[in-house]
Image (tube, rainbow, N blue to C red):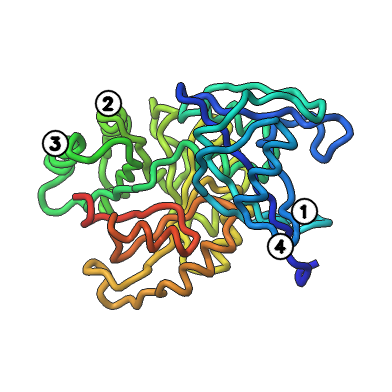
Amino acid sequence: MVDRPRTDIVLGLLREPDGRVWAEVRPEDKHLAGLRAFPGGKRRDGETLRAALARELYEEVGIRVQRARRVITLNWDYPDRRLRLIGFEVTAWEGRPRSVEGQRLAAEPLDRDGRGGWLAAMPPANRGLVNALVLPRCLAITPPIGAEGVTAWQARIESRLHRLPAPMLVNLRPGPESTRLEMPWPTLARSVLAAGHWPVVNPPGDQSLPEGLDPRVGLHLNHARLMSISAGQVRDWQAAGHLVSAAVHDQASLDRAAELAIDLVSVSPVRVTATHSGVRGIGWAAFAQLAGAASMPVYALGGVGVDDLPRIWRRGGFGVASISAFW
C-alpha cells in the first residue's frame, strides 16, 4: 500500500460571480454515495492536468472551461487507494452546469460563515479543498507583548488592523507572557472581525475557551499542544464552528495534524529569523516535501513575506505567515 503510486484526481471548484459554488450529490451506485462532492475525476495516462479538468467537467457537468487556476494539491489515502487531489478554481465556463451522469447538482454560497455546512456534507478528503476556497493567502501573526503591557499592546494591534489588506488571517499571539495575563480575547477578536479579517487565538492551556468567544474565531495549536491534544477536543471545537490551525516543524507533526483533521498548518522555520536567530531554517526543499505530503493548506513561516508567495506556490504551499512582513 505504501509503495503504490498515487492516482491524480482533478476537481473543478466552480465559483459563480455571486460567490456560490457548484457541487454534486454522489449517486447511490458511486463511491461515497449520498455525499456532496466537487465534479471531476481521474487523469488519464499522458493527459495534462488542465486537459483532464476540461474533459472531466464536460463529461460530468456539460461545461467547457474558459478560465481556471490551480489552487491546491492534497494527498489523501483510503484503505484501497492513494490519491492526489488537484483542485482548480473555475471562474468562467461556457454552458450551464447540468447533470450528465444522473447526479443532483446545486450551487450554494461558500464563505467563512457557510464553511461548516459544506464540511458536514462532504467526505473528509474534501476538507482541504473547501478550506482552500475560503482561506486568505496571508496570515499575519501579531508581535509579542513587551514591557508596554496588555492594554497598550491591544491598542497598538487595533490601531494597525485597518492597514492590513483585507481579508487576512490574524493570529493574536501575544507570546508566553499571555499565560499569566488576563487577555481580552473576545474584544480583540471583535476588532479583527470588524476590520474584515479572520481572527485566530491560541487557546488557554486548560483547553477551555474564553467565555463569549465568537465561533468565527479560529484556534491555533503550537507544536506542543498539537502533539498532546485529544482528537475529541479538536472535533468539538470544529463542530462549534472554529477553524483549527497548528504549527508543524517536521513529518511527525504533519502526520499528527492529518490525524486530527487540522484545517491548516504553518510550516516553520523556512529560513533563519531575527526572533529565532539560533534556529536553522529547514530550507525550501524540506518545505516542499512537507507541503507535498499535506492533506490541508500549508503556510510558509519564518523569514518569508508576501513577495515569496510565487515561490511558496511552486513548492506546493498555499500561503505565507509572518510577523515582521505585516506589522
Dot 2: element: helix
Query: Disc 4 on helix, strand or loop?
Result: loop
Label for residue 159? 3
Within 10 Å of disc 2 (Cα), the crowding (few <14, some 14-19, many 20+) is few
Lower position in the chain sequence, tag 3 or tag 2: 3
Viewer-side residue, 63 vs 273:
63
Judged left or right of residue 162, residue 249 is right
Instruction: Tell me the distance, in whole angstroms, between the alpha carbons under discs 4 and 1.
Output: 24 Å
Which marked residue is nearer to the observer: mark 1 or mark 2?
Answer: 1
- Measured in 3D between alpha carbons, the distance from the residue under mark 3 to the one under mark 1, in whole angstroms, is 48 Å
**Mark 1 belongs to which amino acid?**
Tyr
Which residue is at 78% across, 26% downward?
Answer: 103
Q: Nearer the viewer, residue 196 or 6?
A: 6
Query: Of circles 2 and 4, which is in front?
Result: 4
Q: Label 4 crowding class (10 Å Cα cut-off): few <14, some 14-19, many 20+?
A: few
> Which kind of residue does numbered mark 4 sit on?
Gly
Earlier in the chain: of badge 4 and badge 3, it is 4
Amino acid type for the residue under numbered disc 2: Ala
